[in-house]
Image (cartoon, grey):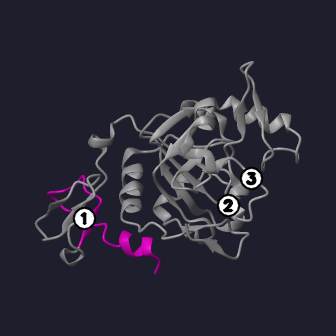
Amino acid sequence: MTLWGFLASFKVTCNKCLHVRFFMPQTFGKYPNTAFDTRRCEYNFYVMSYDFAEKGGNMKLYSYIVTHDTGFSPNPYWGYCTLACCKPIIRRNANIGDWMVGISTKSKGHRLIYAMEVNEILPFEQYHKDPRFKDKIPDFKNPNKLYRFGDNIYKPLPNGEFKQLPSMHSSGALENSITKQTDLNGKNVLVSTNFWYFGSEAIALPNQFHDLIAGRGYKCRFQQELVKEFLSLLQLTPKPKSILLPPTKAFCFRL
């Protein structure tokens, strides 16, 4: 049984705790994460649920298919998961506290590649100049391959325009006008320090979350209970100890 299948097996109904989604046995101990509403129910189980009141009732979850998990979009390296390229509509409309969920293609089993909470929203100029993200500027001369996946690729110019740096979205040393227009139409870069990136170890989605699977574009209209259940289970899922490279890679880098 997968970890998610195991955790989901503790989802039961309690007559006194109808709003609660998960009951963890006492032997698991209390979880200190303040994102949880942690109490005891009459069955002597700890009650674990994602606290929507704390996060805000207007929070949205955006899900979409990651057609190419290359480590570029999203870019989960150097302590931040960032979405700076692709998905312009999502990046224009997302707010702090929203969640991004990337799911693999049908041919790869519709598995969970990553999930991130939006903690910051930056314009491209600020993102490029922020020293926290200097390692996300692509450097193809660096022997560490992680530097090739950088998404900090739009250098502001004095005239207010942007130069697209050599990257996974450029045409070699030349700019790619199509990807440039798409990326810049998103206006913003989404930044997260609260994220799960599974990469080449993408995990299977339990059946109850198949409604998260999007077709073309993205999905953001879900029943609140579905979102609450998904995020509650996600919070119980250990984060990978290393950031794994995309499925096409056979190794990982430990940061």
Q: Which residue is mark 2?
A: 146
Report whether 149 appears left or right of 38: right
Q: Nearer the viewer, mark 1 or mark 2?
A: 2
**As rendered, which of 146 and 95 lies closer to the eye?**
146
Residue depicted at 40% across the width and 55% down the height: 231
Say whether residue 50 is visible: yes
Please state the horizontal and vertical placement of residue 134, each as a whole percent of the image. 62, 46
- Above or below, 162 against 211 in this view is above
- Judged from the image, the secondary structure of the residue bearing numbered disc 3 is loop
* Amino acid type at mark 3: Asp
- Judged from the image, the secondary structure of the residue bearing numbered disc 2 is helix
Residue 247 colored magenta? no
- Above or below, 190 against 45 in this view is above
Residue depicted at 41% across the width and 68% down the height: 238
Q: Which residue is mark 3?
A: 139
Q: Which residue is mark 1?
A: 31
**Which residue lies most toward the bottom here?**
1
* Amino acid type at mark 1: Tyr
Report whether 88 appears left or right of 122: right
